[in-house]
Amino acid sequence: MTRRFGPAFQRFLHNSAAQTFGQAVNVVQQILLVSAFLHAWSKTEYGEWLIITSIPSVLWTLDSGLSGLAGNRMTVAAGSGDWARANLIFHNVLFIQGILSLIIFIGAGCYCGWGDVSAMFNFKLMARHEAGEILFVMILYMLLGYGLGLLRAAYRASMLEARGVALLNVQKLSELFVQVAVLAAGCHATGVAFGMLGNMFVWFFLGWFDARRRCPLITWSFGPLDLAQARSMLIDGLPVFANSAANAFFLQGYPLIVNGMLGSAAVVTLTTVRTGSRTLLQVVGIVNNASGSELSRTYGSKDWDAYLRILKVLIVTTVWASVAAAFGLTLFGPWVILKWTAGKVIISHQLMFLFAISVACQCCWLACGGVLFSTNMHHVFNYTYLVLTLAGLSVAGWAIHLWGFAGVPAVMVSVDALLLGWVLYICRRKLAFISLASLGHIFTPAFYFEKAGSVARHLTGRGKVA
């Protein structure tokens, strides 16, 4: 007896292709931009750029709590055919995000106009006027990014997750070309900031018009609103916001602390090493993001067979990516970074080992956290993530004082190991209906042959599974 290759898994494959393209863009962007900036600017100038752009980066990361929750809830509602509820969620988030964006816009304008951004970060090269102008431009860039996040929620609920991801990826690829072109023209931080804003403006409006055409079941307005639904979104959004806040503080907090204690040049070293060491984390991100919408959809429709199949792929990818991170980065990371930065950034094998262990743990807890988020079972983990991240940042300065730069990866490893143990415990409690025995065969050769054959049949158009 044969059956069709399941539509949920087909969408998972399409989403994986879009995510793969996106992560490829991310990797290329990270690799090229570090080299381009260090070639065009001094290490100190590049460090100051990384610091001033960390503020809008934190705010943009925080927004994923709202738009991510909207996308997840809209997808679950659409999966059960309840488009009225999906649109109520969308309208509420549009309204809340509009108010939030207005507050940020006014606050940023006031501070950048009258405050001293340069003095706040102890900049040596970037003057007060220039720093304020750059920060305000990047805040506008970030607010348009908020809009792209909501467009992706509409695509996701309309079973067009791959198209929504592709929009974000093309915007990033276009931004890469703009940044390289501006640097090649000899421009400094102000020119790069305006180039990024112009590129974001173009792609936001292109995406807006495309989403209105491709997602006809979404009603594009600020109403009607449902106060009960909005209140529920805000209450349930707190743990999602906690996750976004923790992620923002984790990514941007350490560079700010290093800048305060070791200077902007040390920030370049930290950012470069983390960029290189987190490359393998992108693999987990591909499968995690691609599986998120289908985990939500199959969970909402109680299609446990499809849910378990996707979960197995996620687990296998996570484990092997972690192993590759631990061994590959430790052995080859220092040499690659030395060549990549033309000798401007040097890291020892011992320090790279700490970064590699941190990334390996991140691979595992990121995947487990994605499973909990896609099934609305993420609350305790998110709060723990935020608390442990803030605790790590609070002791990072003390660790740097004792051990120098090595204190940063030492703290990161401690936080990531604690998070991994906690999230595994939560997953086991929350998904108790899935037995460990049903997952036991995922590391046998038969599992890989079966999946490889399924993908091959799908790609060749036969779409049959024995």
Image: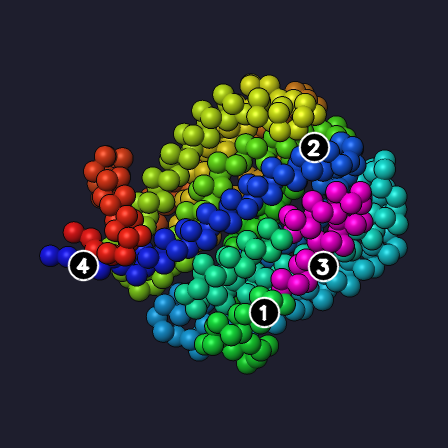
Residue 84 showing in the rendered view: yes
Q: Amino acid at mark 4?
A: Arg
Residues shaded magenta: 175-204
Q: Which residue is at a point 52% across and 78% down the rendered structure image?
A: 219
The rendered magenta stretch, by its main secondary structure, is classed as helix
* Badge 1 vs badge 2, beta-carbon distance below 8 Å: no
Q: Residues within 10 Å of mark 4 (few under 14, many from 20)?
A: few
User: In terms of secondary structure, where does tag 2 sit?
Assistant: helix
Q: Is residue 23 magenta?
A: no
Asked if 343 appears above or below 458 in the picture, the reply is above
- Sequence-earlier tag: 4 or 2: 4
- Sequence-earlier tag: 3 or 4: 4
Quarter placement of the N terminus: bottom left
- Mark 1 or 2: the one toward you: 1
- Mark 4 or 2: the one toward you: 4
Q: Which residue is label 3 attached to?
A: 198
Disc number at residue 268?
Answer: 2
Q: Which residue is label 4 attached to?
A: 3
Residue 231 showing in the rendered view: no
Asked if 458 appears above or below 297 in the picture, the reply is above
Q: Which residue is label 1 attached to?
A: 208
Q: Which x, y percent locates residue 450?
A: 23, 43
Task: Using the numbered discs, state the Cα–Cα distance from disc 1 to disc 4 in whole angstroms.
Answer: 38 Å
- Sequence-earlier tag: 1 or 2: 1
- Residue 202: name its quadrant: bottom right
